[in-house]
Image (spheres, grey):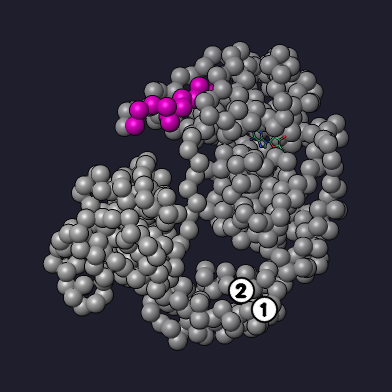
């Protein structure tokens, strides 16, 4: 694997650049170089008319003849754009000897620098490189960005450039300044510029200055989903992009965490029995402390923050301290595990309701309404139940649930390591022990669990071909763990 190239944007204004070649390719390169304000010298025996005209107008200097190393004298860069491979090779070789950066058009191995594909919006430039490995791919990415990046971004970049000084004076604190600028980028100022309304943008700027001066930090409670980063919401992603601090549970997958803003401070607050323990009160303190310091705090929780997530308590604490907050829901484990194990939680033939239950300790097990839970034609989704499975089985059977009721235990739902263990209620705890089911795992109990299907990794099937149908599995079978990057299951109708 070759080392990656180091990306850089060069200020060529007034700097000498040698361009070897006088044809159509050289003409295109000359145009781009002149746009950057470079002092361009073109060396070639003959020039296409456009280049000759530029020379006549004094915009380009011309060295007539075949390349000689002396041409490199005083140049910062050289671009070889002749159709003679030997000349190009000589340019590259001589440039290397003189420590002049060289680009040979369409000959990546001879280049000491490459010219990226680019997307421009005024001063904002996006450069794309495939290291010369896949220029078509780079071009394709450029096309996509061209359609995705609004043309008004150029105006926005220039406009923000004009505000830099005022912003720096008004908000010397970098965290606060970043928040105000972010609000301008995402808010009405950018909208106004998109519609060409600079007066409205100025009004938005004044308002942002006033608001920014008074605004405090805030907390965004974000549901991270069950693990697969594809299950994070767009709003959750946006919050992670704005975060100064991310307080996360252990349940949150590394892939989701990696989506947070690069320099956001990440704090793990493990609440489950484990290596270290952060009390709920301490979590409240941390949230308040960081928000008081004016930061955007993302409280990232596995699944949905309000489903067995104690998100409610955290909001009460914030409310009591007068700290602004926002809640972004997430896909809860029951929903995700149902989808990724092919279990329709409320299939109309089998279940009229689904209950989300937690049974993490003896106390909570004793307070459950077992008679109601044992009712037929309903699906139970039991969170945190790996330990009390024998009690769950005994109580349900004692209250009338058939021992033949199917179950599915989904371990690491939606993750690459997902495993599904199925069986019937009668041997639920024994199966879990035999298969060594570990936390996090979710129990789905009810007739629908019999519909669990083995997953096919669609990513592995050739593009365009229909995925294989999902095969129903028989009880007492462990489903093969899906290959990495299990996709959400698409069930055949
Ligand atoms: N707020 C979370 C639940 C927190 S309680 C949510 O909405 O999903 C923690 C329990 O959730 C775990 O013990 C397990 O039962 C379940 N769980 C969370 N993520 C899971 C996953 N990826 N696979 C299986 N179960 C999961």
Q: Out of 106 and 353, give the one closest to the viewer.
A: 106
Q: Residues within 10 Å of mark 2 (few under 14, many from 20)?
A: many
Q: Where residue 111 appears, x then y in whole percent?
A: 38, 48
Is 51 on the left-hand or right-hand side of 483?
left
Q: Is residue 456 shown in magenta? A: yes
**Magenta span dominant secondary structure:** loop
Determine which of the numbered discs, if any, sits on residue 180 in the image.
2
Determine which of the numbered discs, if any, sits on residue 171 in the image.
1
Determine which of the numbered discs, if any, sits on residue 475 in the image.
none
How far apart are the two marked residues, 2 and 1, measured between alpha carbons? 9 Å
Is 159 on the left-hand or right-hand side of 406?
left
Image-quadrant location for residue 314? bottom right
71 over 391 or under it: above or below: below
Over which residues does the magenta segment extend?
450-463
- Name the residue located 41 percent from the left edge and 62 percent from the top edge: 76
> How many marks are shown on the rendered structure?
2
Image-quadrant location for residue 126? bottom left
149 over 390 or under it: above or below: below
Q: Where residue 150 appears, x then y in whole percent?
A: 38, 66
Q: Secondary structure at mark 2?
A: helix
Residue 23: tell me if it is visible: yes
Q: Where residue 471 appears, x then y in whole percent?
A: 45, 19
């Amino acid at each position: 694997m070759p080392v990656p190239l180091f990306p850089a944007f060069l200020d060529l204004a007034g700097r000498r650049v040698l361009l070897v070649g006088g044809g159509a390719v050289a003409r295109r390169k000359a145009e781009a170089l002149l746009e950057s304000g470079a002092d361009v010298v073109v060396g070639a025996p003959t020039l296409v008319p456009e280049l000759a005209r530029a020379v006549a107008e004094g915009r380009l200097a011309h060295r007539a003849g075949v390349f000689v190393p002396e041409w490199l004298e005083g140049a910062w860069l050289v671009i070889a754009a002749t159709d003679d491979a030997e000349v190009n090779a000589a340019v590259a070789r001589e440039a290397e000897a003189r420590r002049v950066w060289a680009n040979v058009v369409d000959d990546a191995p001879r280049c000491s620098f490459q010219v990226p594909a680019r997307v421009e919006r005024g001063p904002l430039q996006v450069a794309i490189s495939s290291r010369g490995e896949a220029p078509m791919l780079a071009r394709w990415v450029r096309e996509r960005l061209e359609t995705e990046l609004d043309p008004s971004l150029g105006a926005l970049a220039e406009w923000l450039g004009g505000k830099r000084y005022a912003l720096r004076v008004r908000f010397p604190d970098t965290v606060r300044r970043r928040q105000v600028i972010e609000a301008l980028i995402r808010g009405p100022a950018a909208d106004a510029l998109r519609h060409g309304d600079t007066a409205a943008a100025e009004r938005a700027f004044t308002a942002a200055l006033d608001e920014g001066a008074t605004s405090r930090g805030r907390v965004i409670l974000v549901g991270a989903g069950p693990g697969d980063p594809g299950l994070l919401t767009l709003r959750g992603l946006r919050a992670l992009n704005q975060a100064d601090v991310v307080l996360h549970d252990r349940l949150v997958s590394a892939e989701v965490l990696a989506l947070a803003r690069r320099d956001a401070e990440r704090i793990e607050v493990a609440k489950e029995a484990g290596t270290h323990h952060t009390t709920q009160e301490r979590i409240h303190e941390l949230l308040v402390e960081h928000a008081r310091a004016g930061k955007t705090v993302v409280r990232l929780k596995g699944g949905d923050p309000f489903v067995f997530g104690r998100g409610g308590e955290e909001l009460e604490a914030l409310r009591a301290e007068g700290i602004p907050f926002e809640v972004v829901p997430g896909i809860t484990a029951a929903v995700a595990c149902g989808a990724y194990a092919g279990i329709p939680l409320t299939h109309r033939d089998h279940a009229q309701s689904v209950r989300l239950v937690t049974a993490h300790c003896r106390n909570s097990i004793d307070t459950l309404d077992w008679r109601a839970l044992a009712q037929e034609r309903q699906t139970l989704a039991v969170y945190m139940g790996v330990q009390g499975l024998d009690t769950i089985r005994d109580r349900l059977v004692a209250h009338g649930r058939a021992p033949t009721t199917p179950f599915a235990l989904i371990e690491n739902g939606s993750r690459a390591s997902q495993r599904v263990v199925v069986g019937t209620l009668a041997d639920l705890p024994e199966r879990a022990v035999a298969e060594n089911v570990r936390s996090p795992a979710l129990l789905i109990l009810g007739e629908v669990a019999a519909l669990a299907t083995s997953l096919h990794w669609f990513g592995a099937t050739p593009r365009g071909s229909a995925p294989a149908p999902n095969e129903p599995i028989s009880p007492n079978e462990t489903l093969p763990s899906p290959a990495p990057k299990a996709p959400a299951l698409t069930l055949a109708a």
